[in-house]
Image: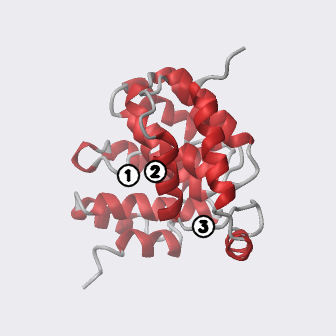
Amino acid sequence: MARSWTSERLAALETSFKAAEDPKRATDMARYMKDQFAFFGFPASERRALQRQAFAGAPKPTEADLVRLTKACWRKKQREFQYFGADYIRQHIEVCDRTFLPHLEFLITHKSWWDTVDVLAGHGVGGLARRFRPIADEMNNWIDSDNMWIARAALLYQLGFKADTNADQLFGFCERRMKDTEFFIRKAIGWALREYSKTDPRAVRSFVRKHDAELSGLSKREALKWLNRN
């Protein structure tokens, strides 16, 4: 069977990644990520340049291409492949239908850490939710997930929505998870509120004030950081 264009391009990217490998930087990057992942060891700017070179002139992917390519990326050992996969979804989420959500859920729940989850949430889930109302409705289930990364994605998927934010849902999600003791949930609550404070500062101040005793200190500090910048 002939190899797909996605396989050919990914093989070319792997060759470029290996040629640029920096073992010393790779060790430092792995340590920063608590030694959960292996790295080739080059900065994001160089990785993106190698990605552009490997995929220059590539046809616009279909949803099936994105699934095939990112599954392959998630099978790779080095973290740079997952960074590329998340980037590629961000760049091409417009080709996907709401049927892409289960694949995003798979990626979010495998090799999970904030560095990929946040991109997949804000640009993957968020990109779908802008076009398909059922995606936003499904977040009502995600927010109660026992998997903290799924719950974090539900908190963060509206990050770039600004005036289009469903504020009732956002504040409701924060209420439902505000007693959570998990750092990444508390941080996400604060981040989501901080971003929305740039659109409706009064509403965010009111929410934090109302739930002062229930929100963690981390969530409150993050929520008010932009409002208290002066």
83 vs 125, nearest the viewer: 83
Residue type of the residue flagged with mark 3? Phe
Residue type of the residue flagged with mark 1? Leu
Q: Which residue is mark 2?
A: 156
Residue type of the residue flagged with mark 2? Leu
Do tag 3 and tag 2 residues touch (Cβ < 8 Å)? no
Q: Which residue is mark 1?
A: 159
Circle 3 SS class? loop
Dot label at residue 42: 3
Circle 1 SS class? loop
Residue 164 locus on image (x, y percent) = 25, 42
Residue 220 locus on image (x, y percent) = 44, 72
Up the image or down, 83 lies above or below 206; here it is above
Is residue 97 shown to the viewer in this render? yes
Marks 3 and 2 sit apart, C-alpha to C-alpha, by 28 Å
Quarter of the image where the C terminus is located: bottom left
Circle 2 SS class? helix
Looking at the rendered structure, the number of numbered marks drawn on it comes to 3
Residue in the picture at 70% in, 69% down: 26
Dot label at residue 147: none
Marks 2 and 1 sit apart, C-alpha to C-alpha, by 5 Å
Chain-order first, disc 3 or disc 2: 3
